[in-house]
Image (spheres, grey):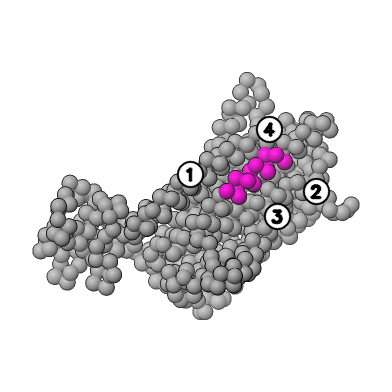
């Protein structure tokens, strides 16, 4: 997509990257909004259905930008001179961005509910599925299947775009989106469709409001004098001692006033149940661990730079065939799928056989391994770019960013492989942890909590890039993230991300110890 923005819409690398960062951020945040409405009001089936329709409309508009000449800037008079290129008008940018927005909203509807909708078809609760390892296996294969769709996009579709043009290149995803939506609707009668539960998210707000209203209420010196409100069929009669001030929301002050004749709360905004309080505590205790995914997502949100790097390197496999620059991210997806296969079908069965019992790494352990491997991937990326830039300068290509550096683009593969393994470990583990810890009625939201960190990571990546650009180009110097990658210092940019990743490793260690201590005490 960055190639389309720079070559067809004549945008600079910084502007193109910012658009893609914002698109990535909305792709991460809309699923969370969709998950709330899916769990609370709409239902998962209908949310996916709405998402299919909106995604299809967004794909149609993107395709129309290639079909309608007035929807995009006129071609450059002299392709070697950027000054001869006409910038896009406000209308043209708004038309293009409207397609991104519709696709993001549509993706929010589909991604927010698809994983939870699939879990519904298993017809079992998350805790029992986790004990048998079925939940981990389901999430692994869901992620692998999603990754395979990206492989198709990065190979088949990108090859068409490079060789047959943007009209056919954007027309193929349009047809695929139509077929996907059609197949989903045709199988409607076969699905298990769970009903939405509007009380869970509202219950969290009620706990916070009730705790605030009772902030001056003192705990009695004798714990036996405390009465807590709980559901008749609840196994929890007393809340835990963690985050104790929230316990005030379920304390009964006067049974005659606080409770109705049937035992329910007279006012749910002043008296909540123990289950509501404990569910909110679980969510709060997950927040520090969840936050470690934000810096990790910054590393995942670097789609532009590897494309520019690959475009300046030798991508030939044979004399007459070379891999498109945009397809090099396929190696990250392939490594993700390969790791899922290796872990689920070889490592786990072999370890279980040797130990004589089911052997699995905990979700928190896998999250930590993913963060550490992501740090290693940034070390590799920084080193490879420093070598590529040195070769480009040695070959006299400083002022020719489109010239081919005599260095194989396959030097970029180790970084992509490490990032793929990191994503397979961390993101799958995050989804498994959230879906198993949080209540079943929050399955859609639990499955998309990692999407929030991805969205915030995209925003943070944009802020980091803009800050580095503003600082480094001062005094007439060339920006580290210049459109001319041979003059810029992308290696320095990667070293900055490496340092942040190392900080994130230590931050995760602190958060994981705190989480384990909290769960043990509970």
Q: According to the image, label 3 marks what residue?
A: 331
Q: According to the image, label 2 marks what residue?
A: 315
Mark 4 Cα-neighbour bin, 10 Å: few <14, some 14–19, many ≥20: many
Q: According to the image, label 4 marks what residue?
A: 489
Mark 3 residue element: helix
Closer to the chain start, of discs 3 and 1, is 3
> How many numbered circles does the render carry?
4
Compare residues 232 and 174 and report the one nearer the observer.
232
Magenta-colored span: 372-384
Closer to the chain start, of discs 2 and 3, is 2
Closer to the chain start, of discs 4 and 1, is 4
Q: CA distance from mark 4 to mark 3?
A: 24 Å
At 75% across and 37% down in the image, what residue appears? 387
Q: According to the image, label 1 marks what residue?
A: 507
Instruction: Give the x, y percent position of residue 400.
Output: 79, 33
Where 410 sits versus 90, above or below?
below
Helix, strand or loop for the magenta stretch, by majority: helix
Instruction: Give the x, y percent position of residue 485.
Output: 72, 35
Where 373 sits versus 17, above or below?
below
Closer to the chain start, of discs 4 and 2, is 2
Where 452 sits versus 17, above or below?
below
Q: CA distance from mark 1 to mark 2?
A: 38 Å
Mark 3 Cα-neighbour bin, 10 Å: few <14, some 14–19, many ≥20: many
Mark 1 residue element: helix
Q: Quadrant of residue 496?
A: top right
Instruction: Give the x, y percent position of residue 133.
Output: 51, 70
Residue reaching furthest to the top: 475
Instruction: Give the x, y percent position of residue 196.
Output: 39, 68
Tell me, yes or no, whether the two marked residues, 4 and 1, touch with CB atoms within 8 Å: no
The reply, left or right, for residue 304 in relation to residue 201 is right
């Amino acid at each position: 997509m960055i190639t389309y923005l720079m070559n067809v819409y004549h945008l600079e690398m910084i502007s193109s990257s910012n658009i893609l960062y914002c698109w990535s951020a909305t792709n991460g945040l809309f699923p969370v909004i969709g998950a709330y409405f899916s769990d609370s009001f709409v239902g998962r089936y209908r949310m996916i259905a709405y998402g299919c329709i909106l995604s299809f409309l967004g794909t149609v508009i993107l395709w129309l930008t290639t079909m309608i000449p007035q929807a995009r800037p006129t071609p450059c008079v002299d392709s070697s001179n950027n000054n001869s290129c006409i910038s896009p008008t406000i209308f043209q940018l708004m038309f293009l961005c409207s397609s991104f927005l519709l696709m993001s909203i549509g993706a929010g509807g589909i991604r927010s509910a698809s994983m939870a909708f699939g879990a519904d078809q298993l017809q079992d609760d998350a805790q029992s599925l986790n004990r048998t390892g079925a939940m981990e296996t389901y999430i692994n294969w869901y992620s692998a299947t999603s990754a395979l769709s990206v492989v198709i996009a990065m190979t088949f579709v990108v090859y068409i775009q490079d060789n047959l043009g943007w009209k056919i290149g954007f027309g193929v995803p349009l047809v695929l989106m139509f077929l996907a939506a059609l197949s989903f609707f045709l199988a409607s009668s076969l699905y298990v469709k769970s009903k939405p539960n509007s009380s869970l998210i509202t219950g969290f707000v009620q706990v916070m409001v009730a705790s605030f209203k009772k902030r001056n209420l003192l705990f009695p010196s004798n714990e036996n004098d405390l009465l807590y409100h709980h559901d008749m069929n609840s196994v929890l009669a007393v809340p835990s001692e963690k985050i104790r001030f929230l316990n005030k929301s379920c304390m009964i002050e006067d049974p005659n006033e606080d409770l109705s004749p049937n035992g329910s709360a007279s006012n749910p905004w002043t008296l909540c149940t123990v289950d509501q309080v404990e569910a909110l505590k679980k969510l709060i205790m997950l927040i520090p661990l969840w936050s470690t995914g934000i810096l990790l997502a910054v590393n995942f949100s670097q789609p532009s730079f590897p494309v520019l790097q690959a475009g300046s390197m030798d991508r030939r496999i044979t004399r007459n065939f070379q891999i498109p620059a945009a397809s090099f991210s396929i190696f990250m997806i392939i490594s993700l799928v390969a790791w899922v296969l290796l872990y689920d079908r070889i490592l786990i069965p072999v370890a279980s056989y040797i130990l004589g019992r089911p052997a699995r790494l905990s979700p928190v352990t896998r999250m930590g391994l993913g963060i550490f491997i992501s740090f290693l991937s940034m070390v590799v990326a920084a080193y490879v770019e420093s070598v590529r830039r040195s070769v480009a300068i040695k070959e006299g290509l400083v002022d020719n960013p489109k010239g081919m550096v005599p260095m194989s683009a396959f030097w970029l593969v180790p970084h992509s492989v490490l990032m793929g393994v990191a994503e397979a470990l961390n993101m799958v583990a995050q989804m498994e942890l959230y879906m198993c810890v949080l209540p079943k009625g929050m399955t859609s939201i639990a499955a998309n909590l990692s999407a929030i960190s991805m969205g915030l990571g995209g925003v943070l990546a944009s802020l980091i890039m803009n800050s580095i650009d503003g600082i480094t180009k001062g005094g007439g110097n060339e920006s580290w993230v210049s459109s001319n990658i041979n003059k810029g210092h992308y290696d320095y940019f990667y070293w900055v991300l490496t340092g942040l990743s190392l900080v994130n490793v230590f931050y995760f260690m602190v958060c994981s110890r705190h989480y384990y201590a909290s769960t043990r005490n509970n």
